[in-house]
């Protein structure tokens, strides 16, 4: 299937390869390994002289269907599926970097990404400079001769800052480095980083791609020469592979991605406008509001503002926790991108294990809450939040 179809058509149909039974829905190939007709065929497959599956740590038809569909949606040459979003970031780093290399990373990324780069990779001789804010000048300043990777999320988690992908990709190119964009918040429905100049796209498929809070998954996408040669080589040996079952669940999620993302984003905009007028809300972080400092950039770079709304509650942590504990409908949980709306207090959960200094740099105050808007009626969501905000 090629790109002559619209995105929503591709999300439903791309990558499907039917077996001899002609099943309509994608088949779930639950098998650890694949059999060969002969010793000679086994040898040919292992030597890479004959295409075909060998062992599900390397590849599996259901996983391949997911990879092909997501690659087409992101406009990428190649996709490698991983067992989680963090496995995607780890595989990207392990496949592309070596001791002595340097990463420039946004200070406003998911807490585990900060720990992976600043803690674990540091032990293996890979240094990371964390950049506060999205100003391209600050990113330029952080570049070193050994810089190989620039990493960002846009919108960032949880403060919804927007990064100019085209401008930062130019900085990466000039430095001979690769720009990696975590596209979990937007999905290809709202933003295609490769079209804007990014080299690699990361997904936590756990979020909107599954979209129903069922399974973990991830993906690394980009040029075949980078993603297949380097990232896949690491993955097939080290093993953070996506399971066939999870790939099948996420394939089903992709089929409804556009309608979910559009409906959830429309509700998020309504929620953001309502919160902005609430007397007990200090500030709302949502790129679809004209008051957002990068409203114009978000409009240029994204097709919609997304389904995540963050806001500062007046009164700090106690007041924020009152809002969380006042909910009866919203799920108090760290996940996002689900059809069920979720509420999170980042400072004590998703970003609780990074230092206070890192939280300050990322702008994550004690009164900050993040709501990932689901598919419930927006009036019910407002009523749920109004209780604790009163
Ligand atoms: C933006 C972003 N990237 C990556 C991850 C990690 O994904 P996973 O939990 O699938 O490992 C998360 C998880 O919350 C996230 O929000």
Image (tube, helix red, strand yellow):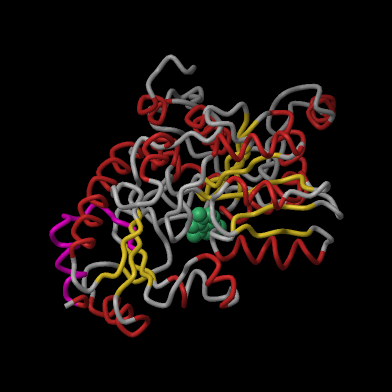
Viewer-closest of 133 and 235: 133
Residue 311: x, y in percent?
33, 65
Tell me if I can see residue 281 in this picture. yes
Q: Say if 93 sits above or below 335 in the image.
A: above
Residue 101: x, y in percent?
82, 51
Q: Say if 322 sits above or below 26 in the image.
A: below
Viewer-closest of 381 and 65: 381
Judge left or right: residue 385 versus residue 371.
Answer: left
Q: Say if 175 sits above or below 281 in the image.
A: above
Judge left or right: residue 327 versus residue 336.
Answer: left
Q: Quadrant of residue 4?
A: top left
Residue under the image location 67 percent in, 62 percent down: 116
Judge left or right: residue 314 versus residue 279.
Answer: right
Residue 203: x, y in percent?
53, 46
Give the extent of the magenta segment. 371-387
Tell me if I can see residue 88 in this picture. no
Judge left or right: residue 335 versus residue 291.
Answer: right
Q: Is residue 380 magenta?
A: yes
Residue 327: x, y in percent?
23, 74
């Amino acid at each position: 299937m090629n790109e002559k179809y619209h995105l929503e058509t591709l999300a439903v149909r791309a990558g499907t390869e039917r077996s001899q039974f002609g099943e309509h829905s994608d088949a779930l190939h639950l098998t650890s390994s694949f059999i060969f007709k002969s010793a000679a065929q086994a040898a040919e497959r292992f030597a890479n002289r004959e295409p075909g599956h060998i062992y599900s740590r390397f590849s599996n038809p259901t996983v391949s269907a997911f990879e092909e569909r997501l690659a087409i949606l992101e406009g990428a040459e190649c996709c490698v599926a991983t067992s989680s979003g963090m496995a995607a970031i780890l595989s990207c780093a392990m496949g592309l970097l070596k001791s002595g290399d340097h990463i420039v990373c946004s200070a406003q990324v998911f807490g585990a990404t900060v720990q992976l780069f600043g803690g674990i990779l540091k032990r293996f001789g890979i240094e990371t400079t964390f950049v506060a804010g999205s100003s391209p000048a600050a990113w330029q300043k952080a570049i070193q001769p050994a810089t190989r990777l620039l990493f960002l999320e846009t919108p960032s988690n949880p403060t919804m800052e927007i990064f100019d992908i085209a401008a930062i990709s130019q900085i990466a190119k000039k430095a001979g480095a690769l720009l990696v964009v975590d596209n979990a918040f937007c999905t290809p429905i709202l933003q295609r980083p490769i079209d804007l100049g990014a080299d690699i796209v990361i997904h936590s498929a756990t979020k909107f791609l599954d979209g129903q809070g069922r399974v973990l998954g991830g993906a690394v996408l980009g040029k075949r020469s980078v993603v297949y040669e380097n990232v896949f080589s690491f993955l097939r040996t080290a093993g953070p592979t996506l399971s066939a079952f999870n790939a099948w669940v996420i394939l089903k999620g992709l089929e409804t991605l556009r309608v979910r993302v559009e409906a959830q984003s429309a509700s998020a905009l309504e929620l953001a406008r309502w919160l902005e007028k609430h007397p007990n809300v200090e500030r709302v972080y949502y790129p679809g509001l004209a008051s957002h400092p990068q409203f114009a950039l978000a409009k240029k770079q994204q097709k919609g503002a997304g389904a995540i709304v963050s806001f500062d509650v007046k009164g700090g942590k106690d007041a924020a926790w009152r809002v969380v504990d006042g909910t009866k409908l919203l799920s108090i949980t760290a996940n996002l991108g689900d059809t069920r709306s979720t509420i999170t207090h980042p400072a004590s959960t998703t970003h609780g294990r990074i230092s206070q200094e890192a939280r300050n740099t990322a702008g994550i105050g004690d009164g900050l809450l993040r709501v990932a808007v689901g598919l419930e009626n927006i009036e019910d969501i407002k009523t749920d939040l109004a209780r604790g905000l009163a």
